[in-house]
Image (cartoon, rainbow, N blue to C red):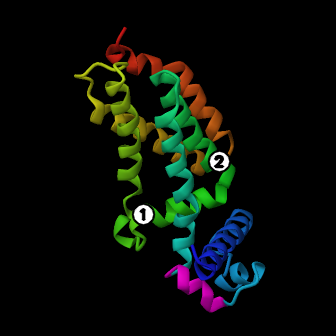
Amino acid sequence: MGSRQEAAVETRRKLLESAKRLVCEKGLANTSVEEITGSCGVSCGTFYTYFKRKEDIVYAISKDMFESILENAQSADGPLMERLTFFMSRFSGYIEAGGLKLCQEWVRNTVDPDLVDDPYSRGKLSLDIGSLRQVLEEGVRRGELSADAPVERLALMLTDVLYGQMLCWCMSGGAYSFGERTEEFCRSHLGMIMAPFIEG
């Protein structure tokens, strides 16, 4: 990577960090592009080199982290139930760590896919279903899950749980821990859901 590319990567990283901090403090509606660029020492025009509009930065903030969560869940050595719990609890824990305001902004800006310009966020639901499907398919490959397990249906159900919990957390104003709620679900219900399909 040349010095110009390294500088571009560093500028984008600064914009993302600045936006995340400001949006978590104030919400996206109360954060201007000028504040984001000013707090990391770049010109306002630089923002538009990396993002089409202010909302796009909210989508970009989460992309790398969710890819890393999936990668770690797939490569872990533990049994399938541990890998599923890891994925689900890291998913909710990461969102909670990003802050209620950031999550509310993301929900507000993605609830109508026709209004989403960013391809990553337009397909985020499909990506999350696909991520859980991959974790389950890895369980089939390792012989932990029966070959006839309804992988697609299970992936849809578990994604529904995560998204439902995320929405309820947003609507409650963060009255409880989203991460703890997901861990509680994994302890009390995930085993019952998966039991009919676990081998051995």
**Looking at the rendering, which quadrant does residue 43 occupy?**
bottom right
* Residue 78 image position (x, y, % from top left): 53, 23
Residue at the spot of label 1: 120
Look at 63% across and 80% down and name the residue there: 3
Image quarter of the N terminus: bottom right
Where the C terminus falls, by quadrant?
A: top left
Residue 195: image x %, image y %?
38, 14
User: For this view, does 173 lie left or right of residue 186?
Assistant: right
Q: Does residue 172 appear in the picture of this structure?
A: no
| Residue beneath disc 2 | 96
Disc 1 + disc 2, Cβ < 8 Å: no
Magenta span: 44-52
Instruction: Please name which of the two marks, 1 or 2, marks the residue nearer to the observer.
Output: 1
Three-letter code, disc 2? Glu
Left or right of residue 151: residue 39: right
Say which of 46 and 161 sits in front: 46
Task: Compare residues 15 and 32 and report the one nearer the observer.
Answer: 15
Q: Which residue is drawn at 49% across and 43% down?
A: 71
